[in-house]
Image (cartoon, rainbow, N blue to C red):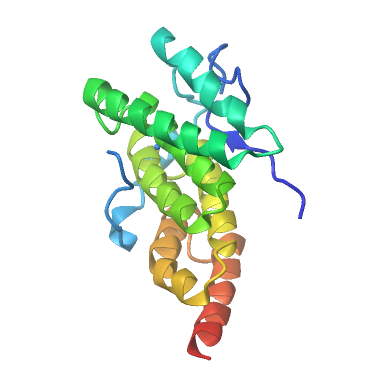
Amino acid sequence: MTEEPQFAPWGVVSAGFWTHGTQPPAAPGPAGQADAYPLLTPAAAHESTETRQPPPPPEEYRERVAAITSTFTPPHDPQRLAWAAIQAERLDQEATATYGPAHTHTISIRELRGWIARLQDDPEAATHWDLHVIRLQGTTWGMHHTITRASAQRAVRHWTEIPDAATRVALSKQLLGMLIAVSGENSSLSRHVQKLVRRAHSAAAR
């Protein structure tokens, strides 16, 4: 399988992705239901589609983030990724204490933690982080913003990589609730996931 580009609100993840100000508490947030992703009013939906981007990070975070993202370059070393996960958790705790859980700096760091989980071959944890981040992004930028939509696509990708069908089924209600809020119940992505959920139910029942 071809490695997907590592897109995030700030652009393509690289060692210097925050250096120029371009475009994930210590654990993922509580499990959310469909109402955790409220559909926006028309006015809010229009505003959320504007090209607003998160501000660049504070200067004191930049070198630390660059060190973390340097571990993303293949070949992936399990020990370096484990180190990155610890550093990202510490950075998350600091950002949460300083800026709060819903600040754009904190959201971006938690998204980073989701990427690390994925690179550590833990798509279930990555999906949990995606869903958590999307709730925060929806509050900050709107459920229909391009940033939130990109995260929704990534959540689907990570969810499909979960090897156990029963685990995929257990996460499917949250995933579909999020997709309905982001792209609508009849969007191509929502319909595609609904088909995959039916298949997962059949596989889990065997």
- Position of 181 compared to 204: left or right? left
- Viewport quadrant of the N terminus: bottom right
Q: Residue at x 48, y 33 (%)?
A: 83
Q: What is the quadrant of residue 22 in the picture?
A: top right
> Residue furthest toward the bottom?
206
Q: Residue at x 54, y 80 (%)?
A: 198
Q: Residue at x 53, y 91 (%)?
A: 206
> Residue furthest toward the right?
2
> Residue furthest toward the front?
79
Measured from the top left, where is residue 143 in percent x and y? 42, 45
Q: Which of 73 and 54 is in front in this view?
A: 73
Q: Residue at x 58, y 42 (%)?
A: 78
* 66 lies above or below 180: above
Q: Which of 34 and 21 is in front in this view?
A: 21
Measured from the top left, where is residue 203 in percent x and y? 56, 84
Q: What is the quadrant of residue 55 in the picture?
A: top left
Measured from the top left, where is residue 43 in percent x and y? 37, 39
Residue 28 appears in view: yes
Q: What is the quadrant of residue 96 in the picture?
A: top left
Measured from the top left, where is residue 125 in percent x and y? 44, 53
